[in-house]
């Protein structure tokens, strides 16, 4: 904040100085050669100011881009915990083996912790919905077809919010949950 005030103050002083030089040259200097010399000085000062402002703006934009890239990298680390949980559940289900619950709990808690810090409001809200639905589903046990479809739509919502949080485009034309499913499950969903 202070840096912005200082730069605005200096810009104000320089603009006032340039305006004063122009007024002085136009109204108070009689000789054309002296007017030309003053306008040359004004031209040089405007060029220098423009160069400094351009360099400052490009430096500021580069810092903003660097910060945004760092933010996306941190978010990727957080969302990776979610995908570790999701794929452990999917793989253990497909391999007909017991899910590695200590791993799932650890990764799930790491995801929650990271989401509170790095997640967007939309990602947090979609996770809360996801968590609520899956807490209820896990209590009920076996799922009927409607519950399976509902769970897929909740997974779809959180996957799209994650992609959006990572600055990827999100479209209703793409079905991200389809990537998680096998060919048989994809066909079942197409027929619904």
Image (cartoon, rainbow, N blue to C red):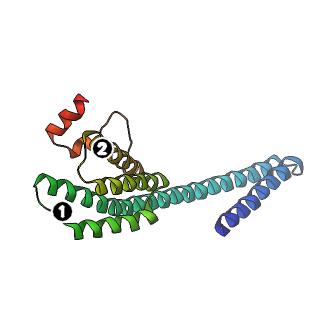
Please give left or right for residue 155 compared with residue 47 in the image: left
Q: Sort mark 1 into few (<14), some (14-19) or many (20+) by Cα contacts within 10 Å.
A: some
Q: Sort mark 2 into few (<14), some (14-19) or many (20+) by Cα contacts within 10 Å.
A: few
Q: Relative to 176, say whether 11 is above or below.
A: below
Q: Which residue is mark 2?
A: 147
Residue 157 circle label: none
Q: Nearer the viewer, mark 2 or mark 1?
A: 2
Name the N-terminal-most of marks 2 and 1.
1
Q: Relative to 170, say whether 115 is above or below.
A: below
Residue 1 percent location from the top left of the image: 65, 66
CA gap between label 2 and label 1 equals 20 Å
Please give left or right for residue 5 compared with residue 28 in the image: left
Work out whether residue 2 or residue 19 is closer to the camera in this orientation and state it: 2
- Report the residue at 75% width, 48% height from top: 36
Q: Secondary structure at mark 1?
A: loop
**To which quarter of the image does residue 88 belong?**
bottom left
Q: Residue furthest front?
A: 140
Work out whether residue 146 or residue 13 is closer to the camera in this orientation and state it: 146
Q: Quadrant of the C terminus?
A: top left
Residue 99 circle label: 1
- Report the residue at 84% width, 47% height from top: 26
Work out whether residue 94 or residue 146 is closer to the camera in this orientation and state it: 146
Please give left or right for residue 107 compared with residue 119 in the image: left
Please give left or right for residue 77 compared with residue 46 in the image: left
Residue 86 percent location from the top left of the image: 25, 56
Q: Secondary structure at mark 2?
A: helix
Residue 85 percent location from the top left of the image: 26, 60
- Report the residue at 27% width, 43% height from top: 148
Q: Relative to 170, say whether 92 is above or below.
A: below
């Amino acid at each position: 904040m202070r840096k912005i005030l200082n730069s605005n103050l200096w810009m104000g002083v320089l603009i006032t100085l340039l305006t004063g030089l122009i007024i002085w040259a136009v109204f108070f200097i009689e000789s054309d050669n002296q007017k030309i010399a003053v306008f040359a000085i004004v031209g040089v000062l405007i060029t220098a100011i423009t160069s400094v402002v351009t360099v400052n703006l490009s430096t500021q934009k580069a810092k903003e881009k660097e910060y945004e890239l760092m933010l996306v990298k941190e978010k990727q680390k957080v969302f990776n915990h979610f995908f570790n949980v999701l794929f452990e559940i999917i793989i253990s289900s497909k391999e007909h083996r017991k899910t590695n619950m200590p791993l799932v709990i650890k990764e799930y808690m790491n995801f929650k912790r990271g989401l509170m810090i790095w997640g967007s409001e939309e990602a947090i809200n979609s996770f809360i919905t996801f968590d609520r639905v899956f807490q209820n589903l896990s209590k009920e046990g076996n799922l009927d077809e409607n519950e399976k479809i509902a769970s897929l739509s909740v997974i779809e919502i959180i996957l799209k919010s994650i992609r959006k949080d990572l600055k990827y485009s999100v479209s209703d034309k793409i079905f991200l949950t389809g990537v998680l499913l096998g060919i048989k499950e994809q066909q079942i969903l197409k027929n619904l």
